[in-house]
Image (cartoon, rainbow, N blue to C red):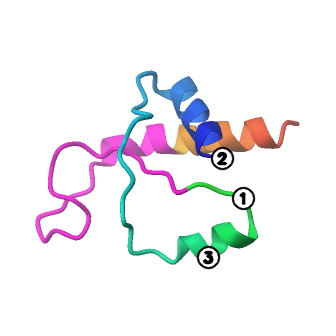
Amino acid sequence: NTGFAADAAEKVTPGVDRNTPPIMAGEDFSYMLNKRPGAYIMLGNGDGPTVHHPMYNFNDDAIPAGCSWFAEMVETRLPA
């Protein structure tokens, strides 16, 4: 599923980094993945402070790419 998500991202924004190191995210998402197929995916947001930093400021310019990425995944998995 990670490959599927990366392939969809590559269609929307060429140059996807497929070689990121694993992270120790503090999410319980792994329990969901034990029940249903899925992938923990991330949308790049620039080089500023990360999400839990007090100076974090989401880059709104990332929204169109993120929406297009999710739409590509849906359209690929659920063709009309």
Who is closer to the viewer here, 80 or 5?
5
Magenta residues span 40-66
Mark 3 to mark 1: distance in Å?
A: 11 Å
What type of secondary structure mainly makes up the magenta span? loop
Pick whichever of labels 3 and 1 is earlier in the sequence.
3
Secondary structure of the residue carrying numbered label 3: helix
What is the residue that sits farthest to the top in this orientation? 14
Tag 1: amino acid: Pro
In the picture, the disc for residue 1 is 2
Who is closer to the viewer here, 52 or 18?
18
Q: Residue at x 37, y 42 (%)?
A: 20
User: How many marks on residues?
Assistant: 3
Specify whether residue 63 is painted magenta.
yes
Q: Residue at x 23, y 42 (%)?
A: 46
Vertical arrangement, residue 23 with respect to residue 75, above or below: below
| Horizontal side, residue 80 vs residue 29: left or right | right
Vertical arrangement, residue 48 with respect to residue 16, above or below: below
- Residue wearing tag 1: 37
Secondary structure of the residue carrying numbered label 2: loop
Tag 3: amino acid: Tyr
Tag 2: amino acid: Asn
Mark 2 to mark 1: distance in Å?
A: 7 Å
Pick whichever of labels 3 and 2 is earlier in the sequence.
2
Check if mark 2's residue and mark 1's residue have beta carbons within 8 Å: yes
